[in-house]
Image: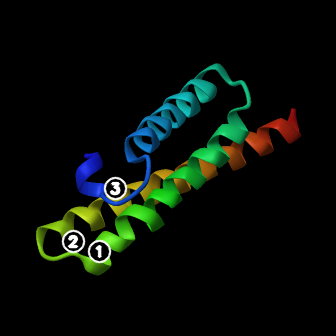
């Protein structure tokens, strides 16, 4: 995956590991409800970074099957990022009413 998507990026394999850990930690934070609102805000930011830094350039410069896969991934990450921000907003409202 690193060679296909992040070719030319410095420390690409470390970025993949760091982003994977961030996804896992955001999920754990939500499950155990410790700093869940912050975790969901940061998860949304991370997913939209994926949209703009990985998927959008592949759509603009790609051809055929690559574009179709990139559009699918873009929509998935945009939807998940929006859902993470929705959950963060819900957590904020729940905190205010409690």
Query: Number of callouts in the render?
Result: 3
| Residue 2 locus on image (x, y percent) | 29, 47
| Residue drawn where x is 47% and y is 51% of the image | 80
Mark 1 residue element: helix
Mark 3, secondary structure of its residue: loop
In the rendered structure, find residue 59 and report the number of the disc placed on it. 1
Q: Distance between the residues labelled 1 and 2?
A: 5 Å
Reading the image, the residue beneath label 3 is: 6
In this rendering, the answer to whether 80 lies above or below 75 is above
Q: Which residue is drawn at 12% across and 68% down?
A: 65
* Mark closer to the chain start, 1 or 2: 1
Q: In this view, does 2 lie to the left or right of 14?
A: left
**Foreground residue among 79 and 61:** 61
Density class for disc 3 (Cα within 10 Å; few <14, some 14-19, many ≥20) is: some
Residue 5, position as x, y percentages in the image:
29, 56
The picture places residue 72, in percent across and down from the top left corner, at 28, 61
**Residue farthest left in this picture:** 64
The residue at the point 64 percent across, 19 percent down is: 32
Q: Earlier in the sequence, mark 2 or mark 3?
A: 3
Q: 24 or 4: which is nearer to us?
A: 4
User: Which residue in the structure is indicated by mark 2?
Assistant: 67
Q: Give the structural element (helix, strand or loop) at label 2.
A: helix
Label 2 – label 3 distance at C-alpha: 16 Å
- CB of mark 1 within 8 Å of CB of mark 2? yes
**Neighbourhood count class around disc 2 (C-alpha, 10 Å): few under 14, some 14–19, many 20 upward:** some
Observer-side mark, 2 or 3, equals: 3
């Amino acid at each position: 995956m690193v060679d296909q998507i992040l070719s030319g990026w410095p420390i690409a394999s470390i970025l993949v590991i760091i982003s994977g850990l961030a996804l896992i930690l955001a999920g754990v934070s939500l499950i155990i409800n410790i700093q869940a609102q912050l975790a969901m805000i940061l998860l949304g930011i991370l997913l939209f970074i994926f949209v703009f830094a990985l998927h959008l350039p592949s759509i603009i410069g790609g051809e055929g099957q690559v574009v179709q896969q990139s559009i699918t991934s873009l929509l998935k990450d945009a939807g998940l990022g929006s859902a993470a921000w929705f959950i963060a907003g819900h957590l904020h409202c729940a905190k205010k009413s409690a």
